């Protein structure tokens, strides 16, 4: 038994040492890849750069988003350009103006955006639309979802890999804080 454990230790150590000598491309393969999803029909060009999309006069549940962008080597990528658009708390998109829409440029590795939790609309569970762009990388268009949302499993566009990491459950009351890390592919 002792001999077996020792052999296992030796083989594990050799495997670990071998991994250190893998070509850079092979090591990068272990880095997650963010799923892309359709932008849908409600994107509008020209959104102003804003980090706070909350509106006075609109009842909504605060949502703080901490977003990180990483490259194929898993290292933070910046500067970045993040387009975020989503439905208002009642499930309606602003198709005439830019409510709940931003095109935010940042030269920092992490971005914090504050908004309201989007409402659901027919056929869709609550979700956020994003396009993440950075020099030297392919733009990524995708959507983010909320853990615990009742309609997630019935939405054909729902992807478990695109769930926000929420500090508290969506069923709970009060403000929500969520984070997500995007992994971009090289251009
Ligand atoms: Fe949508």
Image (spheres, rainbow, N blue to C red):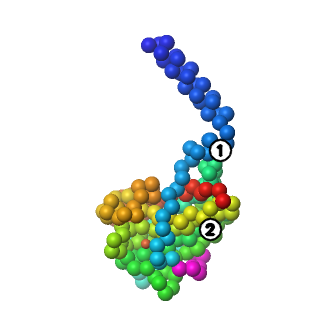
Closest to the observer, 39 or 20: 39
Ligand 1 placement by image quarter: bottom left
Residue drawn at x 55%, y 57% as measured from the top left = 182
On whether ligand 1 comes within 8 Å of the CB at mark 1, the answer is no
Work out whether residue 99 or residue 29 is closer to the camera in this orientation and state it: 29
Q: Main secondary structure of the magenta part?
A: loop
Give the mark nearer the N terminus: 2 vs 1. 1
At x 51%, y 61%, the residue is 36
* Image quadrant where residue 70 sits: bottom right
* Residue shown at the point (58%, 28%) measured from the top left: 15
Q: Is residue 76 left or right of residue 129?
A: right
Label 2 vs label 1: CA separation? 26 Å
Query: In the shown orientation, is residue 16 left or right of residue 89?
Result: right
The residue at which mark 2 appears reads as 81
The answer to whether residue 166 shows anywhere in this view is no
Quadrant containing the C terminus is: bottom right
Q: Secondary structure at mark 2?
A: strand
Q: Is residue 12 above or below residue 26?
A: above
Q: Which residue range is magenta in the image?
A: 44-51
Residue underneath mark 1? 25
Q: Is mark 2 within 8 Å of ligand 1?
A: no
Q: Residues within 10 Å of mark 2 (few under 14, many from 20)?
A: some
Which structural element holds mark 1? helix
């Amino acid at each position: 038994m002792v001999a077996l454990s020792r052999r296992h230790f030796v083989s594990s150590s050799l495997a670990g040492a071998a991994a250190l000598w893998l070509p850079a491309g092979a090591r990068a393969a272990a880095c997650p890849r963010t799923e892309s999803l359709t932008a849908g029909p409600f994107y509008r060009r020209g959104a102003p750069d804003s980090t706070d999309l909350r509106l006075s006069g609109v009842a909504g549940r605060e949502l703080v988003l901490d977003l990180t962008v990483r490259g194929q080597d898993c290292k933070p990528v910046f500067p970045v350009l993040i387009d975020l658009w989503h439905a208002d708390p009642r499930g309606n998109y602003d198709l005439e103006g830019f409510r709940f829409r931003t095109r935010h440029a940042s030269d920092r590795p992490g971005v914090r955006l504050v908004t309201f939790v989007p409402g659901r609309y027919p056929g869709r569970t609550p979700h956020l639309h994003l396009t993440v762009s950075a020099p030297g990388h392919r733009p990524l268009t995708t959507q983010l979802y909320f853990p615990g949302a009742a309609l997630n499993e019935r939405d054909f566009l729902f992807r478990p890999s695109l769930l926000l990491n929420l500090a508290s459950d969506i069923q709970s009351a009060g403000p929500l804080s969520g984070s997500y890390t995007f992994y971009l592919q090289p251009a």
